[in-house]
Image (cartoon, grey):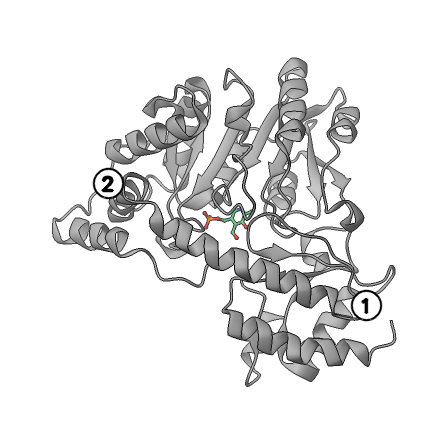
């Protein structure tokens, strides 16, 4: 879709999965200062000590639990963190439970390493919520891990604490790992304390929580993320990390420490903008013929459905060709929602309004 869009004029993208805000000024300053100060060599393999401490203190305080720098590994974005977690554990004979739709990183990585994916479909009628009992019922002899991603890409769904707690506790009891992609852990659009897996378990033996600076501080290109787990797991993952990327980008880790230790008003300001956009986009989607939706509570995506058996890819392709609005079809995110479209509101309100001025009349002309 994006390749096709690149050859067209006047395209409005509601397809992009990265924030559209500038990186906060004080974080930018710290990054530039690190470069000027010659902080351009390798760090220790687990990460820059100041960044490891910043992550441990920040999340320890946020989730009201003890975390030490030895519980943390700094990575090249959340992507490397998920890569390490899965590559180090997935193997033939092991099965991973993965919600569907999901960010298209987990299932290919699991399969690439010889393990098996068992999908757990979620449905638009339930706001794509995961039923914890359904997950628990799927845990079998070969189940090794469960992937969670809340707030979710592509659905924007936030799992309530009861869901996360029920899954994490049952998984620990059954000796199953929970790999939690929490890259949108700050992008909560309704008042709530974020239900991280790190709040839901007293020991970290069966959880790996992953996040990054990409979304929260609008600095996806600086590629800094982290993984939080037990000290034993971090020790093992450090070997994979050394042989994968050696260390994360050093000046960007200095920027990361400044981001986590600095004032957080910049995050709140971005959140306010996402909230206003979410509210408006929910209204606009409800006015769009053929789309059925729900109210997402996090990230910057909504994932409405077209009528059953509609080919979302064909609709998205025609929509792009005929109106110049680029969305992502549901089959990019799994097998359960070929009739869905992912709409990203990491775009200005002006672009959102202009896009729906094209989408609504176009949809009204379709017979689906
Ligand atoms: C759910 C999810 N996980 C991970 C990533 C990648 O994050 P990072 O830039 O930190 O590698 C993304 C990016 O879109 C995402 O949506």
Residue 17 seen:
no
In this rendering, would 176 be left or right of 273? right
Q: Can you give x and y, in whole percent of width and height, for residue 205 in the image?
A: 52, 17
Image vertical order of residue 29 relative to residue 195, above or below: below
| Residue in the image at 65% along x and 21% along y | 171
**Are there few (<14), some (14-19), or many (20+) residues within 10 Å of tag 1?**
some
Residue picked out by circle 1: 290
Q: Mark 2 and ligand 1: say if the CB distance to the nearest ligand atom is below 8 Å.
A: no
Cβ(mark 1) to ligand 1 < 8 Å? no
Considering only vertical position in the picture, is 41 above or below 13? above
State which tag comes first along the sequence, 2 or 1.
2
Q: Label 2 neighbourhood size at 10 Å, few (<14), some (14-19), many (20+)?
A: some
- Residue 20 occupies which quadrant of the picture? bottom left
Horizontal and vertical percent for residue 111?
66, 40
From the viewer's perspective, tell me whether residue 29 is left or right of residue 199. left
> What residue is rendered at 59% in x and 47% in y?
105
Circle on res. 42: 2
Q: Dot 1 lies on which element?
A: loop
- Residue drawn 73% across the image and 59% down it: 304
Indicate the quadrant where residue 338 lies: bottom right
Q: Residue at x 37, y 54 (%)?
A: 219
């Amino acid at each position: 879709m994006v390749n096709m869009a690149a050859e067209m004029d006047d395209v409005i993208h509601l397809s992009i999965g990265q924030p559209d805000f500038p990186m906060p000024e004080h974080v930018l300053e710290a990054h530039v200062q690190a470069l000027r100060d010659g902080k351009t060599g390798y760090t220790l393999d687990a990460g820059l000590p100041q960044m490891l401490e910043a992550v441990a203190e920040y999340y320890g305080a946020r989730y009201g639990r003890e975390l030490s720098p030895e519980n943390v590994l700094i990575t090249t974005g959340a992507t490397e963190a998920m890569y390490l977690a899965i590559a180090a554990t997935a193997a033939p004979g092991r099965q991973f439970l993965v919600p569907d739709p999901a960010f298209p990183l987990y299932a290919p990585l699991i399969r690439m390493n010889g393990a098996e994916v068992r999908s757990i479909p979620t449905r638009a009628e339930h706001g794509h919520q995961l039923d914890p009992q359904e997950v628990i019922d799927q845990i079998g002899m070969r189940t090794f891990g469960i992937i969670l991603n809340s707030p979710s890409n592509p659905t924007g769904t936030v799992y309530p604490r009861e869901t996360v707690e029920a899954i994490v506790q049952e998984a620990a009891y059954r000796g199953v790992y929970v790999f939690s992609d929490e890259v949108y852990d700050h992008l909560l659009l309704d008042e709530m304390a974020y239900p991280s897996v790190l709040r839901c378990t007293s020991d970290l033996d069966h959880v790996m929580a992953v996040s990054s600076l990409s979304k929260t501080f609008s600095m996806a290109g600086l590629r800094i993320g982290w993984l939080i787990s037990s000290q034993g797991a971090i020790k093992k993952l450090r070997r994979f990390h050394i042989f994968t990327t050696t260390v994360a980008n050093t000046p960007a880790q200095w920027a990361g420490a400044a981001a986590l230790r600095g004032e957080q008003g910049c995050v709140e300001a971005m959140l306010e903008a996402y909230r206003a956009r979410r509210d408006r986009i929910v209204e606009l989607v409800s006015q769009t013929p053929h789309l059925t939706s729900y109210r997402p509570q996090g990230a910057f995506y909504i994932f409405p459905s077209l009528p059953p058996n509609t080919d979302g890819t064909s609709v998205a392709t025609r929509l792009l060709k005929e109106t110049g609005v680029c969305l992502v079809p549901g089959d990019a995110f799994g097998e359960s929602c070929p009739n869905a479209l992912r709409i990203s509101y990491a775009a200005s309100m002006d672009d959102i309004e202009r896009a729906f001025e094209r989408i609504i009349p176009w949809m009204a002309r379709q017979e689906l």
